[in-house]
Amino acid sequence: WEYCEDRGIPRLFFVSMMDKENADFDAVYDDIKEHLTDKVIPVEIPIGAGEDFRGIINLFSGRAHIYEPGSPSGEYEETDIPEEKQEKFERWRTELMETIATTDDTLLEAYLEGGEIGRDEALEAMKTAMARGEVFPLFCGAPQKTWGTRALIRKLVELMPSPAEAPAELAQRPNIDQVVELRAADDQPFAALVYKTMSEPHVGELSFFRVFSGKVENGMDVLNANRESGEKLAHVSVSQGKERIEVAVLHAGDLGVVAKLKDTHTNDTLCDPSRPLVIEPIRFPKPDIAVAIQAASRSDEDKLGTGLTRLHEEDPTFASGYDAEVKQTIIRGLGELHLDVQMERLKRKYGVEVTTEQPRIHYRETIRKEAEAQGRYKKQTGGRGQFGDCHVRL
């Protein structure tokens, strides 16, 4: 959240798993207002919760979407708002329209005079307000059933600014005290940031990148400005789930993927060799949850280190290392689920099964109070004798 605040990135919220036990839309809304921002405003409200969750009410259209159980892609029937939800709808819709009106003087004047704000006007005003960080819309759904996800994707397209509308990204010219703006236009020199690295069997390392300015054509030679090495972008593709579709060209704002770059890693900048520049790297959160692991069998011990290294390359928020003091391999992540997923990937991708245990504590001792001691040593067995008298005071 703070990273987006610093960079002025528009945001929206999605309350997930509304079909699960203890789902509570209002509690999440209150939690967001208390801990993140008081500028959050629902644009959808749920019909039911937990096992009773069956649809949403769109506050813009004033219509209910009742989802079809077992539907593979979130089909729904559009109906009138259930009578028992009418009062809640009126209250939330009034708050939504008042919030939108306060972001635009013309709309506010019309609204105060009793005028209605049309759907298109409201969406355009909300998009502008989101770009300025004045409004953060709230959605809900049950993604495992694909309920609400189609509406979310449509709203992402409608409300989020395109790369051409977003603020220019800043980049640094290497060895020159000069900051340049990257405009999302094809007539600008090419510049892209590698935001993720993945390793796939029989393919090798995949580098996912976002084009910030210019365009890149398949087979183009580029510069890795961080490592001052050349790279060839062969078989440039776009990723759709597990599939990769090769394309002839990518434009500013596009996300691409390319395989087998020889010296490129996450957060590296790829750019036009004639204009070297480095885009500000992504600041990944530091892992703060730790667990100790060990290979389930001796045959897996050699593969464990390689697998952990690859997982860190793919996910910088995951870290691992061997603690020689307590003689344990420690992995760290952003939470228990994060670590569970990484251990599952370790088994699935690298064939290494591990067992877990609590990390051992690094015990330390310290002097807690003043003390004095005295010791005497005396040895006389013939010849030259030995004698010592030692006084110690702490």
Image: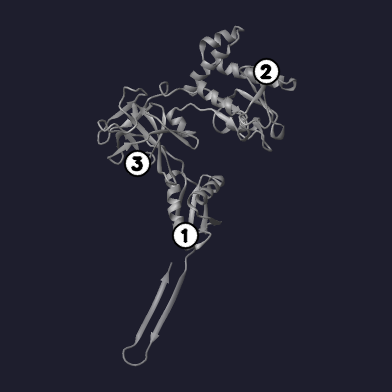
Query: Looking at the image, how many numbered discs can be counted on the residues?
Result: 3
Of the residues under marks 2 and 3, which one precedes in the sequence? 2
Seen in the picture, residue 159 relative to 31 is either above or below; the reply is above
Q: Which residue is mark 2?
A: 90
Q: Amino acid at mark 2?
A: Glu
Q: CA distance from mark 2 to mark 3?
A: 56 Å
Q: Amino acid at mark 3?
A: Leu
Q: Amino acid at mark 1?
A: Glu
Within 10 Å of disc 1 (Cα), the crowding (few <14, some 14-19, many 20+) is some
Q: CA distance from mark 1 to mark 2?
A: 62 Å
Question: In the orientation shown, which residue stands out farthest toward the right?
Answer: 84
Of the residues under marks 3 and 1, which one precedes in the sequence? 3
| Mark 2 residue element | helix
| Viewer-side residue, 132 vs 223 | 223
Q: Position of residue 371 (x, y in %)?
A: 47, 68
Question: In the rendered structure, are the residues bearing label 1 and label 2 in contact, judged by CB atoms less than 8 Å apart?
Answer: no
Q: Which residue is mark 1?
A: 301
The C terminus lies in quadrant: bottom left
Q: Position of residue 340 (x, y in %)?
A: 55, 48
Q: Which residue is mark 3?
A: 261
Q: CA distance from mark 3 to mark 1?
A: 29 Å
